[in-house]
Structures are given as C-alpha cells and as structure tokens.
Amino acid sequence: MAMATNRSKADDGPDDTAQFAASHSVDAFHHGGFYLVQPEGKGHRAGLDAMLLAALVPDDAAGRLADLGAGAGAAGFAVANRVADLRVALIERSALMVECASRSMELPQNRHLASRISVLQADVALGGRARIAAGLADSLYDHVIMNPPFNDSTDRTTPDDLKAEAHAMTDQMFSQWIRTACAIARPGGQLSLIARPHSLAEIISACDRRFGGLQVTPVHPRPGHNAIRILLTAIKASRARLALCPPLFVHDGTERAFSARVEELSNGRASLKR
Amino acid sequence: MAMATNRSKADDGPDDTAQFAASHSVDAFHHGGFYLVQPEGKGHRAGLDAMLLAALVPDDAAGRLADLGAGAGAAGFAVANRVADLRVALIERSALMVECASRSMELPQNRHLASRISVLQADVALGGRARIAAGLADSLYDHVIMNPPFNDSTDRTTPDDLKAEAHAMTDQMFSQWIRTACAIARPGGQLSLIARPHSLAEIISACDRRFGGLQVTPVHPRPGHNAIRILLTAIKASRARLALCPPLFVHDGTERAFSARVEELSNGRASLKR
C-alpha cells in the first residue's frame, strides 16, 4: 500500500471548498487507483485495516455492497476499484465523514468509480422501522462489510466518564451492527469484517442464527507474535461450521516492509478466497 | 513423537493378565520417557492431540492436575513425565480405559511416575452432588486438562440413530465439561484443552463467567491450510481478554516429518508459554 499524503493544491473552487481543503488531505490508495479526502489531525485515518477488509470481497462479486460505518469510504472505494460489477453504498453517521466521502466522489482521479458509489448518512445501530426509515432496506445487499471503530477504554486517553461510555458502546456494537448487517443482506449474502481478536466471542455470539460458515483469518504483525486483528467472513443463513484459516503476517521476520501477501491484498491485486 | 507399538511379550502374570495383554499394546511416548497400555483395534488411540494438550501445562507447574476424560492417560502421563512437581489425577468414565491406565501405572518402565499418578473412575459430565459424590471435589486442582472425544456425526460412520445421539452429546459436551473444570479448579487455576476449531463458539460460551484470559493457538497441518485443532488455555476467574497466539504447523511445507516445534512439544522437551 502506498499512501502518499498530498494536500490538495490544485483547488480552484469557491471559498468553502478552499476552506474545506485547508484542513483535509487527499491520499492515494491502491498505488493511485483511487484517492480519498480525509480530515487531517482528527478522527480515524484509513489505512491497512480498511484495505484488508476490502480484500475479503471476492473478485467475481456482483450486485450491491453496503459499507457500514464507512468513514471516509476507504474500504468501499477499495472494493469498487477492484470489483467492477459491484455498486457500493457507503453508510456513515458522521456528517464530516459523509462530506469527505462526497468530496472523494467528485475528485477527477475517481471518475472511473463515482457512478458506482453512493453515500447515505445513517446510524448503523438503528433497528426496526427507524433503520428502514433511514434508508437501510431489508434484504437488499449481496455484500455487507464493516470495520467498526475501536473506541473502548484501553485504546484511548479520554476522561473516565467518556471511557466508560465508549466501553459500553463497544460491548453492544457488534451485536447491533451484525443485526443490521443481517437485516439488509439477502439470504446467501456475505458479511465481511475486521476486528480485534478479543471481539471474537461477541462476534460469534452476534452471528448466531444470522450468519454461518464463519471463516476467521488471524492477522499477526509478524511470525511469533499474537494476532492484532481478525478478518472474518460469514454467509447469511448458512449452517456451515466455523473454520480457522491460514494466518496473515503483516511483515516477514524483522522486515519493515509489508509481506508480499499483505502488499498484494492491500493494493487491490488479490483477494482472500473463501 | 516416537510411537513404537510393542505388544507386551514379557508378560508372566496370571491368566487374566495374559488374556488382557493379548488384546492390548504397550506404546512408547516421549522417546521412551513413559509407556501406555492401550486397547488394540477399538476406541481412541492416543497420539499427537494428547501430547500437544500436555504441552500447555507450564514447566514450573506444581500441585494437583486433573485430566478429564483421560482415556488411557496419555496426556496426564505426559505432563507427569515433564513436570516433576505435579500430582496427576486421571478421571475416566470407561472401565476398560481405567483398566488400561491402572496397568500402565504398574509397568516397570513407568516406575518413576507411578507415585504421582492416580486414577478415578467417574463421569466428567456429572454435576452438583453427584459430581462430588463421584470424587470430583470443589476447588481442588491447580490445573485441569481435557481432550474431549470427537464423536459427532461428521466423524463416524455409525447408524443414524447413534449418530444423532452422539451429535446431541457433543452439542453439550463442552458446556458440561467446562462447568466441571471450573467447579474443581481453584481460583486462578488453569484450564487447558484441545478441540476442533468449529467448537470455538461453544467453548467461549462455556467459559463465560468461569474462565477468562483465553489464549487460543491454532494448529494447522502445514502452512496454507486451515487449522485442524485449537489449543486453548484459560484462567479461572480471570477477566483478561481473549488472545489469538502464533499458530503451530504440524509439518513444514511438504515435509512428512513433524516440524521442529511440534517435535519438541510432542516429546516433552518444551511447553507452550502463556
């Protein structure tokens, strides 16, 4: 993955565009295959997690894909750039990130993708009628992908009350998000997600009677170290049993560069087969 | 692991011993570190699974260990042979396997271990007073290990009704066995088990509020293939989070011999650190 951070300098739009651009960067992904507008200095910046998540969608996928909690749209754009037969809906609650995603769609560098990508501002945690009213219709999507925010107490230095709130959110996050994923996926549709290993219990529990055929790929920073992420795919209404797939190593041995496998996956040149 | 199968030929005991020996073998483990009497031609024969399970108990363990569903006692003997400060209780329901374990304790080759190993015929699935009456006392053990039988419908060619019964048993087996493990372990005691990957959901669920700090080591037949086993350790009453540890590969590449790591683990020359 080459992620050059290029502040947008060619901006000749009206004042608000100039103002927006001043606090944002335009970053290249997939060796320049697409670009993302991202806020500088705050919030989550897309990187390897989003690219590996995108690699879970098969090359021959077709139909509709929903990227839940899409942020700036990194994973959704990455799938769209590799899989030509998918239309991608970016679902995001934050107005700031929706603005970023919309600006990304207008970039001339993304012209080849823009017609297949849409943005919907909605809260993934909504249920029942509120979800449908927000535009998340039942059984519509062939693929649902998610990279839920990692915001519990051990990862942030926030005041204790905020920590507690964030932790409470995380405790229910996967069950809410996977409930939504199941509702909007067609039978046989694929769920793909990236998470931290300790979320495995909650994810497996949330998939119960919704998604089966879970396939878990541990992601280790390098050989001999505990996994830092899991990649997981599952099929709506499948009754197949859980499998533990061959691990990925971000780096080989003591190398600082990505391993060849992670390099090709993160640059849209390969996908992880189910 | 060197598992030479040597029919007992030096038998000079009474008639029933001769009759017993005729249908049993005496097999070497840990390069001759100990021997096991096992029935020939029926039931589960101990092998790599039991040796890897034993490798989960730390070198400096001390106190009491219970081997639940011990069979012929392979894992319990293997721990006793590596860890000098442990007393090992083999818990087994089958009279035939209890007989094998008792005969193993009488073998002259096992004289260095016999004083630290005991056998108890009891059903691990018992609960409450029945469990205690069977000799499985509360909070007694520093370590509990288990290698539950793999006897569900996809693994055996049995009549359909037997299949169904076996499958039903398996569905509750881990919850029953882990409940028993928690009851008989002291607070802070370690649970160690080997299972198939698809049992992960049931195991995680059964550990809830009983054991924490789960550490899962996938065992792959060789690089690039799905895991065939998981090794799991957990600590009674711990609140630490699940970790996915570096995988084990039984074979390197296309080699037929065990990998160096599996070779040393299965022969009692190393343990898997928590």
Image (cartoon, coloured by chain):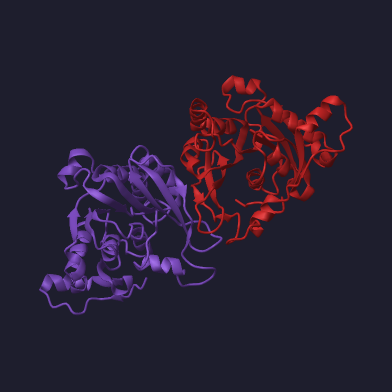
Chain colours: A red, B purple
In this picture, is B253 found above or below A17? below
Rendering quarter of residue A143: top right
Front-lying residue, A4 or B8: A4
At 37% from the left edge and 38% from the top edge, which residue is drawn?
B208
The quadrant where residue A96 appears: top right
Pick whichever, A174 or B122, lies toward us. Answer: A174
Q: Is residue A216 left or right of residue B40?
A: right
Q: Residue furthest left?
A: B14
Q: Residue at x 72, y 53 (%)?
A: A269
Location of residue A185 in the rendering, given as x and y in whole percent from the top left corner: 62, 34
Spot occupied by residue B11 in the image (x, y as percentages of width and height): 16, 77
Question: Would residue B3 be found to the left or right of residue A120 on screen?
Answer: left
Quarter of the image for the N terminus of chain B: give it.
bottom left
Residue placed furthest toward the right: A12
Q: Quadrant of residue A247?
A: bottom right
Number of labelled discs? 0
Residue that appears at 71% across and 51% down? A1
A154 and A242: which is toward the camera = A154
B235 left or right of A35 in image: left
Residue A184 higher or lower than B141, as above or below: above
Q: Nearer the viewer, residue A66 or A35?
A: A35
Judged left or right of residue B18, residue A210 is right
Return the x and y of residue B253 as percentages of the image width and height.
Answer: 54, 68
Tell me if residue B72 comes above or below residue A142 in the rendering.
below
Locate residue B254, reporting x and y percent.
54, 70
Residue reaching furthest to the bottom: B10
